[in-house]
Image (cartoon, rainbow, N blue to C red):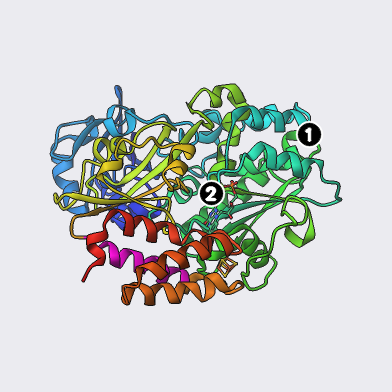
Amino acid sequence: MINVYVPRDTASISMGADDVAACISALSTEINVIRNGTWGMTYLEPLVEVETNNGRVAYGPVSVADVSSLYAAGFLNGGDHLLFQGLTSEIDYLKKQERLTFARCGLIDPLSINDYKENDGFKGLEKALKLSSKEIVDEIITSGLRGRGGAAFPTGIKWNTVMEAEAEQKYICCNADEGDSGTFSDRILMESDPFCLIEGMTIAGLAVGATMGYIYLRSEYPLCKSILKKAIAIANINNYLGKNICGSGKYFDIEVRLGAGSYVCGEETAMLESLEGKRGMVRAKPPLPAHIGLFGKPTVINNVLSLASVPIILDKGGDHYANYGIGRSRGTIAFQITGNIKRGGLVEKAFGVNLGTLVNDFGGGTWSGKELKAIQVGGPLGAYLSRDDLELLLDYEAFSEVGAVLGHGGIVIFDETANMKDQAKFAFDFCAIESCGKCTPCRIGSTRGTELIENQDYELLEELCDLMDTSSLCAMGGMTPIPVKSALNKWPDDFKD
Ligand SMILES: Cc1cc2nc3c(=O)[nH]c(=O)nc-3n(C[C@H](O)[C@H](O)[C@H](O)COP(=O)(O)O)c2cc1C
Ligand code: SF4
């Protein structure tokens, strides 16, 4: 039998991967089609791979119309073709990455627990089961891991607080709301390597003494939901979840809960309200969720990628992870390059690479071929950067020094046709739609902001931005001025009539 891999993630399926898989399958009874996850090279999807004696050979992007010519060119033996990309492992886009968290994505069948185990799966959990809670937490502190959801808070410190809290019941909540524009790394991880998230959450449970975990998943990810539910069931049957994890007598279980399409429900306290079945309104802090969280109990809230980084940290050690990165930004981060870009996709790199490397070396410049104008990093509340910022290092502190944020690693590219006044207005409009309405600076300020831009009252706009920055209850209103001010400061001409 010849193994042919056709990805089964949302992006590939949206580009016709299911039809391509069926078409390849019909070519010969000698073909075994395996539906793997994605490597994250979105610009090549659907990326079809054939297992040869030299390794997996890649072709992409493949459509149904290409299948007969691929067959004629002998793709089942790695033959040459217009879509031939060479050995998958040698594709520059992939080869230049440092894959720790995403090491298995694309490589394995996401729902094969054997594939997972054969590729270092559950090694971190097996190690964690031999350690005390404090030893697990110390390993995470050593790794220097900071929250990948946006706020970059040290994960080990958060876990330590929940570990030290005294309560009969504690929870692990995984934030899979992934609402930032231009982001899809959580989705790729959950669709391509769901056991990794399950393992990370279970280790978190062992570390802090929690027996129940919830994945708060955005409803726009139906495929993710079905893959996660199947993976949870498989992990339960195989004793990697449930009453007797790996025969240790320890208990941990996970449930998937769906959001309802609200950006602010990604904010951790609004997420807790939503998980409790209430309207997603932001809670005032303190108390911190680590003390009084879900159903009033001490709760760890972490992003998908923070939790999915935990298995490799436990397996290879906190020091190994901390060896990647610069300054206080340790380990790797998953960048997602989107918008007006030739080669969009996911790039996992150690912190410290510069913006230009991602936009030009990986991304290949603008899709339109027109001049690059703006790069929004960190979601809809992130700063707009310009061509002058391409040397900027991707590091939490370097970004903060220039008034920008790395957020969840989304990088959205705009060419010279973009109008930055429109983009600034969009920031306020977005805030007005998504605001939970609890505090005045955000609820009212967002609408006034749009009006001030329309009326070109930029002096009052600066004042409004300062007010929202200092007086909003959460980062939704607090960060909306970031894209507005960066657009105004860098492209003042766009704001003239
Ligand atoms: C408006 C708003 C939306 C947010 N959306 C998300 C989200 O979709 N996913 C996420 O992980 N964190 C999101 N966050 C950050 C969370 O509040 C929180 O910091 C994070 O889930 C903590 O996990 P971490 O420490 O692992 O990053 C959002 C924050 C704000 C203010
Ligand atoms: S800043 Fe906006 S989203 Fe946050 S609490 Fe205030 S009204 Fe709600």
Disc sitting over residue 455 in the figure: none
Q: Which residues are magenta?
A: 418-431
Amino acid, disc 1? Ser
Q: Residues under labels 2 and 1: Cα distance?
A: 31 Å
28 with respect to 294 (left or right):
left
Comes first in the chain, label 2 or label 1: 2
Disc sitting over residue 248 in the figure: 1
Residue shown at 35% from the left, 68% from the top = 458
Question: Pointer 2: residues within 10 angstroms few (<14), some, or many (20+)?
Answer: many
Q: Is mark 2 within 8 Å of ligand 1?
A: yes
Label 2: which secondary element: loop
Regarding residue 17, the answer to whether it shows in the image is: yes
Residue shown at 52% from the left, 22% from the top = 323
Which residue does the numbered mark 2 point to in the structure image?
149
Residue 431 against residue 229 in the figure, above or below:
below
Q: How many marks?
A: 2
Q: Position of residue 241 (x, y in %)?
A: 69, 44
Within the displayed image, which quadrant is ligand 1 positioned in?
A: bottom right
Residue 196 against residue 273 in the figure, above or below:
above
Q: In the rendered view of the protein, which quadrant contains the C terminus?
A: bottom left
Residue shown at 58% from the left, 59% from the top = 267
Label 1: which secondary element: loop
Q: Position of residue 414 (x, y in %)?
A: 25, 54
Which residue is at the front of the view, 208 or 437? 437
Q: Mark 2 and 1 residues: CB-CB less than 8 Å, in contact? A: no
Which residue is at the front of the view, 490 or 98? 490
Q: Main secondary structure of the magenta part?
A: helix
Regarding residue 240, the answer to whether it shows in the image is: no
Which residue is at the front of the view, 260 or 35? 260
Decide whether residue 430 is among the magenta residues.
yes
